[in-house]
Image (cartoon, grey):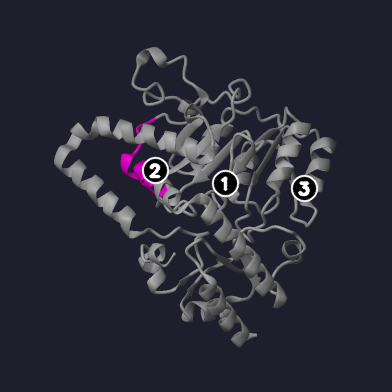
Amino acid sequence: MDKIKREFPILRKCTYLNTAVFGPLYDALIDWRQEHDLDALLHGSDMWDQTLKTLSDTREKIGHFFNCNAENVSLVYNFSLGMNLLLEGLQSKKNVLLLENDYPSVNWPFESRKFKCTTLGLTTDLEERVEEAVKKNNIDVFAFSIVQWLDGFLIDLEFIKRLKRANPDLLIIADGTQFCGAMSFDFKTSGIDVLGVSGYKWLLSGYGNGFMLFADNLENELKVPATGFNAANGNFGNKETMALAKKMEPGHLSSLNFGSLKFSLDFLDSIGLDRINQQNLNLSKKVKESLGSMGLLQEHVVARDFHSTIFNIKGDEKLFNTLLNNDIMCSMRGEGIRISFHFYNGIDDLEHLMKVLKTKS
């Protein structure tokens, strides 16, 4: 792990607890990006065939990494863009269930299109209340972030499987931006119909790349009107026969951006996703115990058996500045201070955080 940590220059200058804002870049990725741009400089349009291969390889890699058929993978520049394209293909008469204070790019696209929205606040028994709301309000669509951006609340994915089995016509749309790359995930068995992800956080891929995964047989449910020559693979004959996933790619895509995503998925694979998953589960447990013992976490977080590696601790701007002054990189979010751990963080990072917090308590 020490060798891996040396790949990240930012880790040498601070205690980096801010992956929920931006996953730091690392030396090997920068080397690849520089080589890519040098090839573009020297070869110009001759790179086109290599660009097409890079994009195809990226779809294949995403499909393998998250267990989704490559033909059901869309490359999008970020989750927000993909979500808005997607909802243009969904009838606004649908009844939608959302979570209160979820990431704005999950909730706002539904609200701006005048869907009939029901919103649930986060509580310890959220899953039970979701199940009740689906039945009571005749919900057609449940849209949510797997991990909540403000406090790291992690929805029970086993519950999502059960919910889908009990309500096969329920369209389940999830944002995995604060989840994918931090913990293991199998899309085909998840019960989720559409998963959207931006790659610049836990997938460590920099800005401008993301993806959407689609379950089979959503063509009738999601009649996305987006179109373009790239969606037709540059073939006039494909104008009327584009698959749903391709409609989300109407224009040309950047081999630098999406090649970076593939490179980082390969990088995470080389470390081992099981190893990353276990490291983050261990970190989550230890951080929760440490912060909970100081009374710094919300009750709906403390009372649950599982959590992500994102936490929101009780504190004001004065405490926030104290953390920054002690070289702890974090963020003000909601009513507190958000910290986030990834596999390259160790117990030493937690100990440093706790030392500063105890000094100020």
Alpha carbon distance from label 2 to label 1: 17 Å
* SS category of the residue bearing label 1: loop
Question: What's the amino acid at mark 2?
Answer: Lys
Residue at x 38%, y 41% (from the top left corner): 258
Task: Answer yes or no: is residue 316 visible.
Answer: yes
Magenta stretch: helix, strand or loop mostly: helix
Residue at x 24%, y 51% (from the top left corner): 34
The spot of residue 99 in percent (x, y) is: 70, 49
The spot of residue 67 in percent (x, y) is: 54, 36
Question: What's the amino acid at mark 1?
Answer: Gly
Question: What's the amino acid at mark 3?
Answer: Glu
Q: Which residue is mark 3?
A: 127
User: Residue lying furthest bottom in this view?
Assistant: 359
The quarter of the picture where the N terminus appears is bottom left
* SS category of the residue bearing label 2: helix
Circle nearer the N terminus (1, 3)? 3
Q: Which residue is mark 1?
A: 176
Magenta range? 251-264
Mark 1 crowdedness (10 Å alpha carbons): few <14, some 14-19, many ≥20: many
Alpha carbon distance from label 2 to label 3: 34 Å
The spot of residue 259 in percent (x, y) is: 35, 42
Q: Which residue is mark 2?
A: 262
Judge by depth and name the residue closer to the eye, 223 or 245. 245
Circle nearer the N terminus (2, 3)? 3
